[in-house]
Image (cartoon, helix red, strand yellow):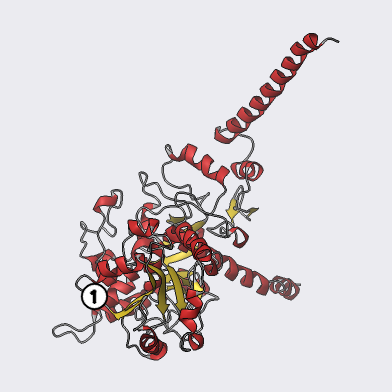
Amino acid sequence: MSEKSMLPSRFLFCLITISMFLLILSSLFLLQFSNTSFIPNSVFKLILVNSTSVYFKSSGKNEQTKLPFVTSVASPVDSKRPMGREGSCQISNASKKMDALGQGRRKGCDPNQAHLRAFMYDLPPEFHFGLLGWTGKANQIWPNVSNPGRIPSYPGGLNLQHSIEYWLTLDLLSSDTPNIVRPCSAIRVKNSSQADIIFVPFFSSLSYNRHSRLHGKEKVSVNKMLQDKLVNFLMGQDEWKQLGGKNHLIVAHHPNSMLDARKKLGSAMFVLADFGRYPVEIANIDKDVIAPYKHVLRSNPVADSATFEGRPLLVYFQGAIYRKDGGAIRQELYYLLRDEKDVHFTFGSVRGNGINGASEGMASSKFCLNIAGDTPSSNRLFDAIVSHCVPVIISDEIELPFEDVLDYSEFCIFVRASDAVKNGFLLNLLRGIKREKWTKMWERLKEIAHHFEYQYPSQAGDAVDMIWGAVSRKISSIQNKLHRKNRYRRSQILLKRN
């Protein structure tokens, strides 16, 4: 057969192949977006993409239960993969495109599709937004959160670093607000029997910061009074009695918050800054969640572009130097480093121009020291991250947020306290890190910085979204332990009946 006579055949073959591909593709999209699809949405997602959601049949009729999502960062194996600010960390790129197609017409989150379902007590405003000075109409418990520009504001300064309860409460309130677009990682449900977790909306850190001192003729502080009332309320709830509070989530981020109530409520899951002031039987890594501080420094544009050569300082630290307990190391390091020409190690506070000075200093430094103080952690680590200054962590007892899915060694330097105080050890270590190694860590810092941002509305992969992911993983672990305990219990019950 001649070459000319073969051309129509080749053209016809290509045309048929392309047509079949387009037909299959269009059929898939029709099945996904049609309300009458005979393929369940969950099955479709499992076919189309590598979804992180896992479904199993419940005991109810025609019900599906979704296991808590495994991680907000896909999996620990994928933690080295670059993640952009706008990208969701819990789903694949294909899933993100699917979600974007439906985002314009979505009216809030579907409770059946949410990864974490939370029941939130309707506590009186005195426990939450009332502490901010907000007063609603008669019998109004919650502010209107449909307009992000008009939500009650949180006090500034150092108060902000422990404002985690504020952001989580806002996020749950917005989950059933139609015009707020946010991730569907956690959603508020009105029936506690449908919930994975029971959320306690008490602004405990703000209560401590603003109301822990006695005023006038007060014999009991407002902070203690609120804690006592909260304990009495929770102990009387059926939700608490069912599991002894193990399915409750309480935010106590300030290390001195909930001092009066923590022992009585210790069976609950806490959201904390660290375990520095908690006995292990009250708070521990097995049941509780470590959340990042809200950084005090603002994002500095210079930090995005300041490369190795553009940061003349080798090491930066500014803060309280004379601390007690584990923080005594700060004083030792001060005497070791204060006279070095490329080191900034001085006393400082947020007063005056302290915040702006720290922002400029961190953005001009290659490494920023995060040294244990009165507690193992501080917001200085997260100020360094937002400044893209490679953190040097000298705190042997520190617990880090989301460490089960983030490898901090990719963007932080860890030094044992006993080594850091050896003459010359720390500077020799840091001066030995060359441009290529530092730049790799700096680039990784820019990739993960959005995981530590608190904002309203929340965004995929930000601090709020990551905290819900950490809570979900804890719930999954707790459920696993409970199920293991129940392995033979049901058999024993059946034997007794027989």
Where does label 1 land, which residue?
A: 210
* Of residues 125 and 206, the one drawn nearer to the viewer in this rendering: 206
| Residue drawn at (61%, 28%) of the image | 26
Residue 347 is situated, as x and y percent measured from the top left of the image, at 28, 81
- Residue 84 sits above or below residue 193 on the image: above
**What is the count of numbered marks?**
1
State which quarter of the image contains the C terminus: bottom right
| Residue drawn at (61%, 45%) of the image | 42
Is residue 192 visible from the viewing direction of this image?
no
Identify the secondary structure beneath mark 1.
Answer: helix
* Of residues 264 and 291, the one drawn nearer to the viewer in this rendering: 291
Question: Which quadrant of the structure image shows residue 465?
Answer: bottom left
Residue 61 is situated, as x and y percent measured from the top left of the image, at 61, 49
Name the amino acid, label 1.
Arg
Q: Outermost residue, right direction?
A: 1
Residue 446 is situated, as x and y percent measured from the top left of the image, at 45, 58
- Residue 342 sits above or below residue 336 on the image: above
| Residue drawn at (75%, 74%) of the image | 495
Question: Which quadrant of the structure image shows residue 220?
Answer: bottom left
